[in-house]
Amino acid sequence: MKVLWAPWRMDYILSDKTQGCIFCELPKQNRDRENLVLYRSSRAFIIMNRYPYNNGHIMIVPYQHVPALDGLPDETLLDIMKVTRHAVSSIRKAFMPEGFNIGVNIGRVAGAGMEEHIHLHMVPRWAGDTSFMTVFDDVRVIPEHILETYDRLFAALNS
């Protein structure tokens, strides 16, 4: 039997779970590295996904708590797209991906885990980054510790 280690997950398993909306609460705490908040603009922020599909899987989140894009003012929608463009450029510098998946899940049936607070997912992609591991038992191999990825992305996004 082969063992896949993900020791950073134990912190989450043993931690107190946040009540309420994490996308509203985490940016207020001013513990950006601990909360994996990478970048802030006037209307949105970038946060790493704690359970990424790939290294560099981030989310772009408006500060405004709404469940769908039609609840956001035009200024916020524009800011989200500018932050998305900045993130693509920065992740290219930091990780040199060959492509990106960028998308929004609106509603639980569409895959939204936090359906009450709209957010955009960005997943960098490389040729061959999906393997047999996802076919057998829904396992992903993430080759870098999440805080090392945070440090690399933080430097790229904030330089």
Image: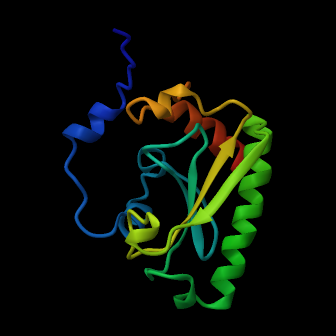
> Count the marks: how many?
0
Residue 159 position within the rendered picture, expressed as x and y whole percent measured from the top left? 76, 48
Which residue is at the front of the view, 38 or 101?
Answer: 101
Q: Is residue 36 left or right of residue 8?
A: right
- Residue at left 50%, top 43%? 52
Relative to 117, residue 124 above or below: above
| Observer able to see residue 106 | yes
Which residue is at the front of the view, 113 or 65?
Answer: 113
Q: Is residue 8 left or right of residue 106?
A: left
Residue 152 position within the rendered picture, expressed as x and y whole percent measured from the top left? 65, 36
- Residue at left 58%, top 35%? 149
- Residue at left 36%, top 14%? 3
- Residue at left 38%, top 26%? 6
Which residue is at the front of the view, 152 or 97?
Answer: 97
Please, which colouring scheme is shown?
A: rainbow
Relative to 116, residue 114 above or below: above
Quarter containing the N terminus: top left
Which residue in the rendered view is the most extreme toward the top?
1
Residue 50 position within the rendered picture, expressed as x and y whole percent measured from the top left? 43, 45
Residue 48 position within the rendered picture, expressed as x and y whole percent measured from the top left? 52, 49
Relative to 61, residue 52 above or below: above
Which quadrant of the structure image shows residue 95? top right
Which residue is at the front of the view, 157 or 65?
Answer: 65
| Observer able to see residue 140 | no
